[in-house]
Image (cartoon, coloured by chain):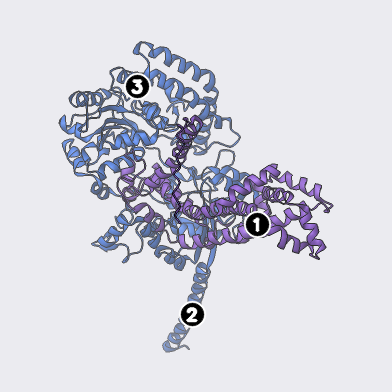
Chain colours: A purple, B blue
Amino acid sequence: MKINPVKINPVKTKKPFDFFYAFNVVLLTLVLIVTLYPFLNVLAIAFNNSDDTVRGGITVFPRVLTLENFRTIFAFSNIPQAFLISVLRTVSGTFLSVAACSMVAFVLSRRDFQGRAFLSRFLAITLFISGGLIPGFLLMRDLHLMNTFLVYIIPGMVNAFNIFMIRSYIDGLPYELQESAKIDGANDFTIYWRVILPLCAPVLATVALFVAVGQWNSWFDTYLYNGSNQSLSTLQFELMKILQSTQIGRDAAYGNDIAKQMQQISPDSIKMAITIVTITPILVVYPFLQRYFVKGMTLGSVKG
Amino acid sequence: MKTPKNRWNRLIAVGCIATVGITSIMALAQNSATTPITFTAFASDPNANWNNMQDDVGKFLTQKTGVTLKPEFAVGDPIAKINLIAASGQYPDFIVPKGQQGVLVDAGAMLDLTDLINKYAPNIKKVIGKQFDRMRFTLKDPKIYFIPNLDSIGQIDFDTDAWYKLQLGALKEQKYPRIKSLQDYEKVITTYVKKHPTTSDGKPTVGLSLLADDWRFVISVTNPGFWATGASDDGEWYIDPTTYEAKVHLTRPEEREYFRWLNHMNDIGLLDKESFTQKYDQYLAKIASGRVVGLIDASWEIGQAVNSLKAAGKFEQTYGRFGATLKPNMKAAYNQPTGFRGGWGIGITTSCKDPVRAIKFLDYLASPEGQVLNSWGIEGKHYNMVGGKRVIPEAVQKEKSNNNNAFARATGIGSYNWSIRYGDGVKDATGNYYTTNFPDQILANYSDEEKSALAAYNVKFWNDLLPKPSSFKAKPWAAAWSIPVAQDNPLNEFWNAEQDITRKYIPQAILAKPADFDKIYDTLLAELETKISKYSKLQTQLVQDRLKLWKILK
């Protein structure tokens, strides 16, 4: 049997010019350029010869390709150790913070929890009022958290904003899920662990990303609490030190050592190279979490 | 009756006992002087090269003094951290607070070092010498809390900077004319721009470019007002050397004439139109392109651009520097001696476990041995004595120049300037310089183009073109900007108030038509009079208090 191919005549209608679509393309292209260009510029300067950078006019491509800026940074031998600490604090800090926040959020979402309103308000206060630098410092000292690794983890572990975000998400889940689990004989922890947490994946990923970026970027707590303890130094703190030394080296009062001055790479180039070193790990992780990120943000906010 | 032999025996016995005694006492003394002790410290400047004393000099210091330093270096703004230290009541043993001294003294954190220095620190006393009183804190509280370590003592500047800069190529083309006055300076620019209206790549030549980006305005626009009129650097102030009264330096009649000259430079089209709008990086890029003939700026501010020019082999576009003045009878005062300026240093806190060991440690660092250690390193390793001269072996020097950070980390040279010390150009008992910055080294860093220019001027250093330090009277108050201002003194508002006025009117005056210049300058002076004169009284008080503290005024 032979089937005659049916010839379909495409309807020839002239597609009307979609003004809105064109506008969107132009606008989003502009947004793309505006957001991407600074990054490419930083990248170009980081890989460009520092003496050449001073001449200006670097846009998207390096003019005189060099790795010298990075070599200068990695010449400081504290970097590997600091990198390790940074990874450790990011991984353990994120894990513990997500665990702690989600537990508190779960408890706050339970209608049968008596102190719910009070605890919510209490937590909300910390969103608006903080103890300030000096009381915070004194507290850490009295808790004997100075010069410890735990000072990176514990103070920021329970964060009200993250708790509210997770709670809003849990509030959006049908409460019947919990009730039916209970009827099936699950205790509260089982409900949290086996029912709620798996459903919360998007919001947990979002919170994890927030916390991880915060942990990764933070240097001020190292400076405040562990500044004299080299073995607990973090990557950002070390990079900050390098940046400051190059800047100071260029200043007047320190301009005596001419050999040093001649040799030094300009602070701007160092700054750009440091930026690249700092954001690369986040850039690597981000695409894997981004999917959840968008979802978690919108879901959480609509219901919240 | 004692036989001589008997007596002899007894003498030996006594000798033996005495020797044993003395050695054991010495051993004991030695022991207490070098028993391991750890001092914590906080320093307001970062030092990325600190290597936990595991460097050559650090190991030697620990071995010699028993001291291990465990310092923390400020990163970012030290003010917050010092406030924390003051508030927490847990102080490190040593602290170098720079501008934050007052907070710590108010908190009762600092030890009075006067007696400690007198008893245990002969080297510190020797280095500070007759200027001992300049270490005292304030007139109200004349104790010694800090041993100065930021400013070195007796520094001789072989290569003082001067602000009026001209491209070496332009100077060469015009056969190296003498640059004494602003007119000489202007003439080089005019002639050059007329002959080369564009650079080789077709861009217009810029006659004179100024920089007014934020605080840099002061360096390149207003400070030259006193440099060109024979006054020296007192920050925004001018201190009358006879009455010790302070006034804003812009109010001096000579300076009006200086800004009139800048107005004239703008009028004849030689002043860069972007002078008051360009950002620092744009300014550097412009200089690095080699098209700016004249600059009025400090060398440290244009260093990056000049390095870039050198890297590109454009040595003729780098700059010679001159102390040009408005009138021939004015002496460019770049070299006017200030004496030791007092000020920032290291203190021992009340938390210190062993202040005596602490001061002895600082005293060792201030000793000739300690100072040579810090700037030269260890003999036989980082330098050799060749015919009575300290010489850095070529391999060491190469490492130092090419790999400075790694070198500093490995050797520790330069990381131990915690105590008072001599500056460049001061020689020790062996006739060698204490520091490694001395004339030969500066000469080695001049390019061939600079050397031929200097040869044409018949001098060795650019500094030789400036009036010598000996031709000035030392400023008894040192420098007005070096006097610390107490936290509660309204003088702290002065800078912002004054900058609001000057950054508005000075550019206006320079860019105005010459006929309007005086009107604008008068407005500037009137504004300064109404809004700033109250601060002048406070500054006068500050200067006079210092003079009383230093026992110059009764």
* Residue ID at (68%, 56%): A199
Give the x, y percent position of residue B147.
49, 49
Of callouts 3 and 2, the N-terminal one: 2
Residue at the disc numbered 1:
A98
Tell me whether the residue at label 1 lies in contact with that at label 3, contact meaning CB atoms closer than 8 angstroms: no
Residue at the disc numbered 3:
B258
The label nearer to you, 3 versus 2, is: 3
Name which residue type carries label 2: Val
Picture disc at residue B246: none
Q: Chain of mark 2?
A: B
Q: What's the CA distance linking mark 3 and mark 2?
A: 77 Å
Q: Is residue B391 left or right of residue B488?
A: left
Tell me whether the residue at label 1 lies in contact with that at label 2, contact meaning CB atoms closer than 8 angstroms: no
Secondary structure type for disc 3:
helix
The label nearer to you, 1 versus 2, is: 1
Secondary structure type for disc 2:
helix
Q: Nearer the viewer, residue A248 or B129?
A: A248
* Residue ID at (49%, 16%): B526
Q: What's the CA distance linking mark 1 and mark 3?
A: 66 Å
Name which residue type carries label 1: Val
Mark 1 neighbour class, 10 Å CA radius: few under 14, some 14 to 19, many 20 or more: many
The label nearer to you, 1 versus 3, is: 1
Residue at the disc numbered 2:
B20
Say yes or no: labels 1 and 3 on the same chain.
no
Q: What's the CA distance linking mark 1 and mark 2?
A: 70 Å
Q: Chain of mark 3?
A: B
